[in-house]
Amino acid sequence: MHLKNHLAAAVSALLIVSPAAAGISGVTYLAFPDSEPLAAAHAPNDPTTLYVAHRNGVIRGLDVAAGTWDVDPLLEVAGVDASGEGGLLGFAFHPDFATNQKLYVHATIDPGDAMPGVLDPFNTQVLEYTFDPGGAAPAVRTILSVPQPTAFHNGGWIGFNPAASAGEEGLLYLTIGDGDTPASAQSITSGDLLGKVLRIDPTGDEYPADADRNYAIPSTNPFIGGNEDGEIYAYGLRNPFRASIDRLTGDLWIGDVGDDTREEVDVIRAATGGGENFGWDACEGLTDSDGSGGCAVLKASTTVTDPVYDYMRPGVGPVDFTGVSVIGGVVYRGPDPAVQGRYLFGDIFAPGASYWSLDADDPVGSIANLEPELFPDDNSIGGPVAFAEDLDGNVYILTRFSGIYRIDTDAVVPGDFNADGVVDAADYTVWRDGLGSPAEYAAWQANYGATAVTWTAPSQGVPEPTTVLLAGAALLGLQLTARQR
């Protein structure tokens, strides 16, 4: 296709957007992985590459613009045991990765007394890798090792808080399931870390005599100074497989996979500082876990934090809002103002709709089927296994069998010509090189410093054709540049 035809197609696509229709407008297929993908992230210093963790222990880079995989993997984690629900479950770049070159993985590792790939208990481990600028093999250090009683309910998310208070940017959060031993979730004084959210400082070591615990306990953790285990940040969880932290508020959102009756979405609000008990194994969602009345008994003796949203199993609830394995998602904070604050999540084995959204400020009252927006042509991609964000806040979907996709949106803040979610000096360069009009310059000047998170659309007004043309040209230019690499 000739350049002018590319431009015409891009402009035509943008011209049909009206303010009333602004928001999620579909998905774009990126690539198919060579093994089951379970997590993805951009490095803080690399906006063009989406790094994808595969269940078999490999982290490989994906050029988002070209849709091609790096030939050499970023990392191969040794000893990964992918039996049961195990594997390389999550990873996180240190916020200061550009300087310290540290990456952390959450994986199930064969302890040496079992055959990899055999359905046998393994250890949940957090490993720190420090890359060598000279290209040598990265140095590896065990931060935490927790024996798992079974090969199920392992949790697996790991991450840093992008909205952390000063001095807490390097604290590491991770989720661990109950290991199919439900009583572990309520145990907080025995050293049992199963069924919990943990928060640790991976740069310290308060346990020099323990090879399995090479970290410090943050002084601001909720269980400090008592008999409780200090690394616990929240508890009462069954299998918190996927989670994320809202980059604006610092709230930690968790998808906790249920047992027989309910799936739940839990939130640790940043203002609470942790300490929440989400009720498992007595409570499941807003109900009793086994019909024995244990949830009411627990709530009578301690404070239990209810999920902000729970949903039922197939055959019990509405078909488009039922499922069997919730996949925690992300609160959208990308470049489209119309989608701000929507929590996007799903269920990998839902019988009807597999993707939903809710307003982070009104979860129950705003739950909506997301599939008409994601798949306007009814071409579903199957259930998600994970969601991810890039540096600009765009959201990606990882699936088990149909590949990796980017969620598309159709609006930006006026003046945000490079569509990165903020109106800044970089947009002036795009305006200048794209021969923009005085009207675009005025929009850029009026909104300078605004972000997609903070900007409020005026009550009336439709983008001028020149603005649309400039945005289309800018986006097309970025695409063509990427293709010519």
Image: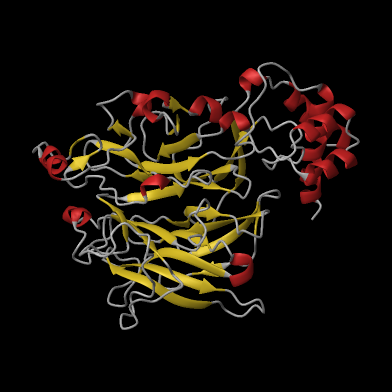
**Position of 390 compared to 11: left or right?**
left
The N terminus is located in which quarter?
top right
Where residue 199 sits, quadrant-wise, is bottom left
Question: Please, is residue 46 above or below residue 271 in the view?
Answer: below
**Position of 448 compared to 340: left or right?**
right
Where residue 81 sits, quadrant-wise, is bottom left
**Position of 363 compared to 27: left or right?**
left
Residue 95 horizontal/vertical position (percent): 56, 61
Residue 316 horizontal/vertical position (percent): 24, 26
Residue at (22, 64) in percent of width and height: 226
Residue 418 horizontal/vertical position (percent): 75, 41
Residue at (72, 20) in percent of width and height: 16
Residue at (69, 22) in percent of width and height: 17
Question: Please, is residue 93 above or below residue 440 in the view?
Answer: below
Note whether residue 469 is visible: no
Question: Please, is residue 388 above or below residue 103 in the view?
Answer: above
